[in-house]
Amino acid sequence: MTKTEISGIAPFFIVKNVPAALKFYRDRLGFDITFQGPSEDNIFFGIVERGAAMIILKDIGVDPVPNYTRDIKKGIARWDAYLHVPDPDALEAEFLFRNVEFFKTIKDSEDGDAGLRGFEVKDADGYLLFFGRPHAG
């Protein structure tokens, strides 16, 4: 049997305020708002996209719980989403222009057997996003 392609995956983040989260992703990270609602005067659900990356945002009346808050303080398992970026250096330059505050600036690192090049940003609700790729050579 042949495998059918899966073309993407989207994290689903519980947020405190969907309009504020949408504004952060649009204005700071350059995402497009592709849905907000269910109505103009009651926005508790939203979707942002940039290229093949999609993030779903919803306010359900509970506080967000980013992974780093559950960390055992050894720096492991802190990312809430990994966003593959072919050229993380160029994206970092764009984010600098957009006045994005970095949690960790760009670097090459080793994570077990997978060396990565990239940087980290916390969103408006504290979710930690890694933007990067496996490093070459």
Image (spheres, helix red, strand yellow):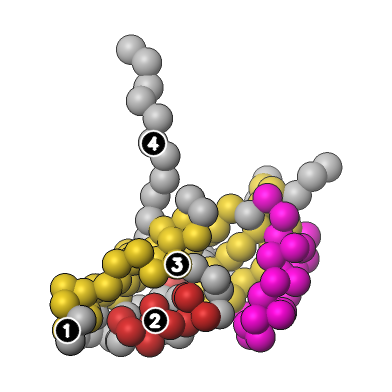
Residue hosting label 2: 21
Q: Give the number of the mark in front: 4 or 3.
A: 3
Cα distance between the residues tagged 1 and 2 = 14 Å
Q: Earlier in the sequence, mark 3 or mark 1?
A: 3
Residue hosting label 1: 42
The local crowd at label 2, few if under 14, some if 14 to 19, many if 20 or more residues have their Cα within 10 Å, is many
- Proximity of marks 3 and 2: CB atoms separated by less than 8 Å: no
Q: Give the number of the mark in front: 3 or 2.
A: 3
SS at badge 1: strand
Within the magenta stretch, is there residue 88? yes
What range is drawn magenta here? 86-111
Q: Earlier in the sequence, mark 3 or mark 2?
A: 2
Specify the label residue 27 is tagged with. none
Percent across and percent down for residue 38 are 16, 73
> Looking at this view, is 108 or 34 the one in front?
34
Cα distance between the residues tagged 4 and 3 = 22 Å
Percent across and percent down for residue 125 are 41, 84
Specify the label residue 32 is tagged with. 3
Q: Residue at x 75, y 49 (%)?
A: 135
Look at the image and tell me in which quarter the C terminus lies.
Answer: top right
Q: Earlier in the sequence, mark 4 or mark 1?
A: 4
Q: Residue furthest front?
A: 40
Q: Which image quarter: residue 93? A: bottom right
Percent across and percent down for residue 65 are 35, 78
Q: Residue furthest right?
A: 137
Q: Which image quarter: residue 42? A: bottom left
